Amino acid sequence: MRQSNRYRQLRALAFALGAAAFVLAFFHRVAPGVVAADLRATFDTSATTLGFIAAFYFYPYAAMQLPSGVLADTIGPRRLFTAGTLVAGAGSLVFAFAPDVPWLLAGRALVGLGVAVAFVSVLKLIASWFSEREFGTWVGVLQMLGNLGGVLGAWPLAWALAHVSWRSVFVATGVISLLLAAGIWFGVRDSPRDAGLRPVHPEDRTAQENGADWFTGLKLVAANPQTWAAFTMHLGLIGSYLTFSGLWAVPMLTDGFGMSRTDATLHVTGMILGFAFGAPAVGALSDRLGLRRPLLRGLALLYLASWTPWVLGWHLPYAASLAAFVFMGISMAESVLCWALAKELNPPSLAGTATSLVNAGGFLGVALLQPLVGWILDRSAGSPALVGYQGAVGLLALVALLGVIAAFRLRETRCRNVCAELRGT
């Protein structure tokens, strides 16, 4: 279908503003690992408490995934996105001015609640404004941009902390979020139809039409075994990856391997960049091949293998350890195909519900694993630091294995929606 200039401009604006909010979500996800030492110094926290501070972002994030999907399919992503970005901005300001740990937890929870809607909202916008054979590509681009936000929360944040306080950083991110909320409200439209244009997908329905049977749609998505295979894959792979990159990778490298904070955050930056640039490449290659499973399975196995050096406690040369972190990030790029499969294995009008339910798996994993890793480290007090971290990353590797097993249970879709075929089998 030939697209008008106005169509291209509106979809570009929707994607750009959505991606900007997603960048901030990734920043908040990764930042605790870099400010961990500052939080310890300011509030005299234990490893378990640090785990809970990081995890309080993920509890509301995981809990809100399914409601976010239903809301994106009913009231539309524009309203949902605006409200979420306002809440995230408020949470960042609460975190910045927190006088004690309970206020830190409240700020992290508000941030998690607000950014919980970002990813699902952008996925819904991509599903509405782009064709099926473009979905993997643009979700990959979204992941690249989001991970660049994670990069900002790694080495650049470590550099900034040498010049300004951690509180100033979170004040700035809070103000940016509030400004972005205004941009989303005035600049984004839920779909081409809402902008008075011809929709990409003839089967697209308005938010009001979707809202009439949202519960039926939810039951339909939840009754699909393929949805739960994707959910479990996400729990194992994304859950272990974000637990590691979002908090424990930097302390492991500094406390267990004796690196400086700058070198450790550079490793995390390399891992995030590997994910960032691997994601659009994997999404585009999958769209071009017209296949999902070969890349999905191969990269999942490589990700599992990437845990080996840290489980065994290898003291690698600096260049080799940096390369190992980059390799882990590249292999995690398979996650973009998991979201594509969630959409293609369920009805098109329920793309928000399907992707949000699958997305919840990854963040449920992080919410459970962050404090559990902290508990393992506290229990190993008195032993060499590296021994405790070997036990912690061993747990993360086992969870990653669960995700790999689930990846091998997902069906091939050939980059098209096959939910009607599934119901017919």
Image (cartoon, rainbow, N blue to C red):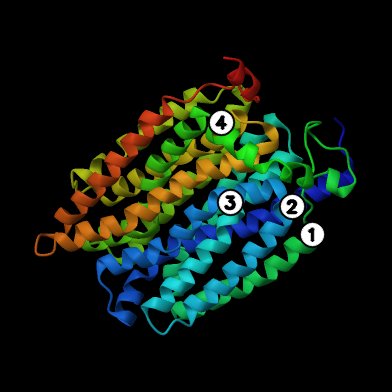
Closer to the chain start, of discs 1 and 3, is: 3
Closer to the chain start, of discs 3 and 2, is: 2
Left or right, 72 with respect to 252, comes to right
Q: Quadrant where the N terminus lies?
A: top right
Residue type pointed to by label 3: Pro
Residue at image position (47%, 76%) is 95
Neighbour class for label 1 at 10 Å: few (<14), some, many (≥20)? few
Residue at image position (70%, 52%) is 77
List x then y, in percent, for residue 415.
62, 25
Closer to the chain start, of discs 1 and 2, is: 2
Residues marked 1 and 2 touching at CB (< 8 Å): yes
Tag in front: 1 or 4: 4
CA gap between label 3 and label 2 equals: 21 Å
Q: Secondary structure at mark 1?
A: helix
Looking at this view, name the residue that lies furthest to the bottom. 99
Tag in front: 4 or 3: 3
Q: Which residue is mark 1?
A: 187
Q: Which residue is mark 3?
A: 67
Number of dots carrying numbers: 4
List x then y, in percent, for residue 68.
60, 52
CA gap between label 1 and label 4 equals: 29 Å
Q: Secondary structure at mark 2?
A: helix
Closer to the chain start, of discs 1 and 4, is: 1
Q: Which residue is mark 4?
A: 341
CA gap between label 4 and label 2 equals: 23 Å
Closer to the chain start, of discs 4 and 2, is: 2
Q: Quadrant where the C terminus lies?
A: top right
What is the quadrant of residue 93 in the picture? bottom right
